[in-house]
Every structure is written in C-alpha cells, then in structure tokens.
Image: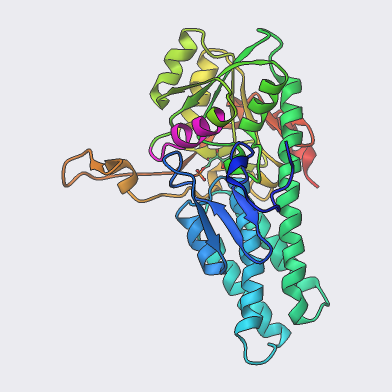
Amino acid sequence: MSLDPFSSHKMSEASHVYPILWQGDHILLVDQTRLPREYGLVEIRRSADMAEAIQRMIVRGAPAIGVAAAYGMYLGAKEIVAEAVDVPERQVFLEKLEAIAGLLRGTRPTAVNLFWAIDRMVALARSTDAPITGIADILLQEAQDIHLNDLKTCYRIGEQGLAVLPEQPEKLRILTHCNTGALATAGYGTALGVVRSAWREGRLERVYADETRPRLQGAKLTVWECVQEKIPVTLITDSMAAQCMKEGRVDVVIVGADRIAANGDTANKIGTYSLALVSKAHNIPFYVAAPLSTIDFSLADGSKIPIEERNPEEIAKVGDTTICPPGTEFYNPAFDVTPADLITGIITEEKVVTPDELRSLKR
Ligand code: MRU
C-alpha cells in the first residue's frame, strides 16, 4: 500500500482511500455524503469552506476532522495576509487567526481531535518568531505533519490491535459500529484498521457492520471500504447485534472513539453504548481503538463530554422519504458515552491499556 496522501489523486487508487488530499495549493476531500452512490471530490481553497465541509460531514470521523481543521487553519492564515492591504501587525494577525479557529471549533462539538489539532495550530502561530508572511507556510508544514502522523498512527493501532485479538477461533468474526476506516482518518482507520490488519494476517473470517442509524455510516462507508478491499462483510441493522451475538456469530467487538475521558469513559457514535451492554451480556470482548489524540485528560469522566445533537431530519427521513407523521417530536443525539467498566481495552498506537491504566499514557 502506498503511504502518500500528498500525491496527485487518481481514481484508480480508490481502494487506497485517502479522504483528504493535499494538492499543492488546495485540498481535495472525498465527499462522504455521496458515497457509495458516487465517488466525488470537493475542492477546498478557503477556511470557511473547510468549516462548512466539516459541519456538513463531507469529511467526518474524529481523526479526519482534526486533519481537515489543521488545513483549514493554514488556509485561514493565508487568507489573512492575502486579503490585507498591508502586512497586518502580529497582534491583528493572531486575533484574525483566532476568529478562524473559532469558526472551525464551532463545527462539531464531540470529537476532541478537532480541538486538539486547532489548538496545536494556534499555539504554533503564537510561538513562532517567523515574519507574518511566513506563518502560513509554517502552519502548512504542521498540518502535513498531523496528516502523515495520523496515517502512521493508524498502522500502529492496527498492529497493537492484532496482539490482543482473541486467540480462538483462528479466524475471527469482528463486529464494528459506524465508520472508523480510512475515510474517518488520514487513511487505514482505527477500529477498521485493526480489522484490515487482521484480514492481512489471515485472522479474519468476516466483519459484521452495524448500519449505524441515522446517518448510516456503517452501511454506506464501512461496507464500501470493505467491498473495495474484498474484506468479507455482512451488514446488519443496529438492533440485530444482540441476536447475532446470541447466535454465536461474533467473537469480538471493536469500535472507534470521538473522545475518551481520563477514566476511560468513551464517547462514540450513538449506539455504541448499547453495543457495549449487549457485548457484556454475551461475554464478548469489547475494544475501543483510538489514537492518543482522542484522549481528553482534562475531563475526569465522560459526564462532561459535549454531545452533538443533529438535525431531526436525519431521523425523520429515510432517504428522501419522511417516515413519521407531521407533529412528531424528535431527539437526535449523534453520540453516546460508554462507561469505562464495559470496555475490555483501549487500543492506542503506543499500547493497549485497560481503562484503569489509561492515565499512564498521559504525557
Ligand atoms: O458523526 P461521525 O460520522 O463523524 O462519527 C464518527 C464516529 O463516531 C467514529 O466512530 C469515530 O469518529 C472514530 S473514527 C476513527
């Protein structure tokens, strides 16, 4: 597999999925709202367009939106200088950059990778002595560093995950939720990265992919990725997971994360919590795979993790068809928090830890 999200994009490389592609002076995003119907790319040249792309979920998944936001900060720094009549004072430049950071931070509240990446870019802009006209280039290098590191991190998560997979049966049935694959990261994936590694090592019989109501990231994106790479995949609705476990079809569950609190409580796509509960009831190991950048050590537990509520239309409609009567009231939380005691282990790029051991990873 080539490891190059910076090279010119070719459609024939679709099985080596890179959702974010640096193109020399702009960014291409794979439009995840159009998959699997069509594989389309969106050109991003301005920070406000990047913010809109994150908000509309053209790019999505915790690590991927961190990378996208980092590029958004670079674009913003470039705009500030390009749009000023004279080179702005450092203080004015930093204030404008902070406003762009605010716009990007306001796109989605739950995935901490977004804030982690933006904070890193702001801190760098504040600390550098470079002339104002050189800051955008410094931020570009940082964005590329975040981008490439995420890809390397995913490969390491894949390796770490392999080491803790159950020894029996030799070929595993892995159930996963939402999309945590190449599309949700710089490439390869977290939980789906472990699945990919298991497939390459001959340790995978098949993946069960939850469809993941209401936006169907499992059905649309995870299944698409698996089909691209000929990884055997079976699509189920979210409510079928317990029955599949009862029938002995699932050996291990691996999911991703949007934010992990210091005690191991984990926010992930809505439905993850009930999956953890039914895994426990069936004595099936339940792993969370995530980079260290997804851990929010500032939160003691999951109770303070902000949960995004999205447009009710997402549950009111299936495709273009409204499925409920006029006057229906809605509640549409996009994430839930799985308590740490339901989690067997957290697979990071450094090592696999139990929730109790998570604090040992704090740097
Ligand atoms: O709303 P989304 O599609 O951005 O949610 C994605 C998830 O919940 C993923 O499981 C999580 O971001 C981990 S991605 C490696």
| Residue 108 seen | no
> If the image is split into quadrants, where does the N terminus sit?
top right
Nearer-the-camera pick, 29 or 287: 29
Instruction: Specify the quarter for ligand 1.
Output: top right
Above or below for 339 versus 77: above
Above or below for 197 versus 119: above
Nearer-the-camera pick, 26 or 257: 26
Nearer-the-camera pick, 247 or 85: 85
* Residue 75 position within the rendered picture, expressed as x and y whole percent measured from the top left: 63, 69
Q: Is the magenta region chiefly helix, strand or loop?
A: helix
Residue 273 in the magenta stretch? The answer is no
Above or below for 216 versus 237: below
| Residue 275 seen | yes
Q: Quadrant of residue 198?
A: top right
Residue at image position (39%, 35%) is 213
* Residue 215 position within the rendered picture, expressed as x and y whole percent measured from the top left: 41, 40
Left or right of residue 357: residue 115: left
Nearer-the-camera pick, 25 or 70: 25
In the image, farthest residue toward the left: 326
Residue at image position (60%, 28%) is 229
Q: Quadrant of residue 127?
A: bottom right
* Residue 266 position within the rendered picture, expressed as x and y whole percent measured from the top left: 58, 37
Residue at image position (61%, 39%) is 182
What's the magenta region? 214-226
Residue at image position (53%, 48%) is 60
In the image, farthest residue toward the right: 129
* Residue 86 position within the rendered picture, expressed as x and y whole percent measured from the top left: 67, 92
